[in-house]
Amino acid sequence: MISFNYEIDFGLNDEDKWSQWIEQAILDESCKLGEINFIFCSDAYLLELNVEYLNHDTYTDIISFDYSVGKELHGDIYISLERVKENAKVFGVTLENELGRVMIHGVLHLCGYKDKSGSEKKLMRSKENFYLVKRS
């Protein structure tokens, strides 16, 4: 089950369409959907989590907490809408496009993808692009 939670004044248009897209990506990655919670929040909210749980005193657009069991995906994906809006401006894309990129990025982490090394980042970006095209 995919759920969308809002700690800010925001709401996704057509949550069912977003859920179907995410679930199909999970299946394409040979994983099974367990319970994934997307939590949309502010910079301040996400910074507090970043400091408390990851010891990083920096703003970020996303933090994924992975509770998966094998290939059954479970997790909480926190997304700063402020960062996503800023990144959309910086990269010259729509808010919906950048939001999709960040959301699928979190799901890909739950699928086991990392983004620490250059080659991992390249693969992650390739996967993000692949699923963004499928969403269009």
Image (cartoon, helix red, strand yellow):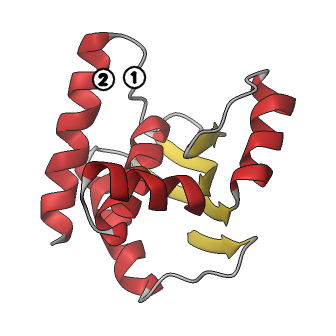
Is 27 placed above or below 4 here?
above
Between the C-alphas of marks 2 and 1, the distance is 4 Å
**Residue type at numbered disc 1:** Asp
Question: Circles 2 and 1: CB distance less than 8 Å?
Answer: yes
Mark 1 highlights which residue? 115
Query: Which sits in the foreground, 35 or 98?
Result: 98
Q: Is residue 20 left or right of residue 131?
A: right
**Residue 107 % position (x, y):** 44, 48
Q: Is residue 32 left or right of residue 53?
A: left
Q: Residue at x 24, y 35 (%)?
A: 125
Circle nearer the N terminus (2, 1): 1
Mark 2 highlights which residue? 121
**Residue 103 % position (x, y):** 44, 56
Which residue is the extreme one toward the right? 52
Q: Residue at x 49, y 81 (%)?
A: 12
**Residue type at numbered disc 2:** Lys
Q: Badge 1: few (under 14), some or many (20 or more) residues near its Cα, within 10 Å?
A: some
Q: Is residue 6 left or right of residue 69?
A: right
**Residue 128 % position (x, y):** 25, 45
Look at the image and tell me in which quarter the N terminus lies.
bottom right
